[in-house]
Amino acid sequence: MISLKLFVFALFAAVVIAEEKPVAEILSENTNVNPDGYNFDFKTSDGVSRQEEGSLITVDEKQGIAIKGSYSYLTPEGEEYQVTFTADDKGYKPTIRVLPVQQ
């Protein structure tokens, strides 16, 4: 019984001590959708950004969507990860870059 009380107390203490992260705000956002495809982009106050566009493609007799875009985010250590990608009938192909910590 003592270990259960200790566990509950430790859990309560961890919740109280834990830092509350601020909610990210949208700094910019654009979206366009049309019969041939779409595109969008956004940026948030916590360093996340994304840009993507999709267009209809025909492969053999089947229709699908080809997508290309990029996104980036900051790690808790301050590194910025940038991912550029394409996704189509040949698969998903990402390229990842890690930028150094900003001083």
Image (cartoon, helix red, strand yellow):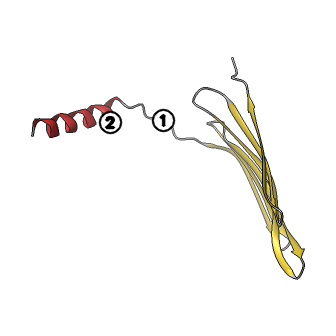
Location of residue 66 in the rendering, given as x and y in whole percent from the top left corner: 83, 64
User: Along the line of sight, which residue is nearer the eye, 28 or 38?
Assistant: 38
Which amino acid type is shown beneath numbered disc 2?
Answer: Val
User: Along the line of sight, which residue is nearer the eye, 6 or 90?
Assistant: 90
Above or below residue 98? Residue 66 is: below
Above or below residue 88? Residue 20 is: above
User: Helix, strand, or loop for circle 1?
Assistant: loop
Q: Look at 32% across and 36% down and name the residue there.
A: 15
Location of residue 99 in the rendering, given as x and y in whole percent from the top left corner: 74, 29
Q: Horizontal placement of 102 versus 67: left or right?
A: left
User: Which of the 4 image quarters holds residue 87?
Assistant: bottom right
Which amino acid type is shown beneath numbered disc 1?
Answer: Lys
Which residue is under mark 1?
Answer: 21
Q: Residue furthest left?
A: 1
Which residue is under mark 2?
Answer: 15
Residue 67's disc is none
Q: Horizontal placement of 73 versus 51: left or right?
A: left
Q: Look at 89% across and 75% down and name the residue there.
A: 58
Location of residue 65 in the rendering, given as x and y in whole percent from the top left corner: 81, 69
Q: Of the two numbered discs 2 and 1 on the same chain, state the one appearing first in sequence.
A: 2
Q: Residue furthest top?
A: 103
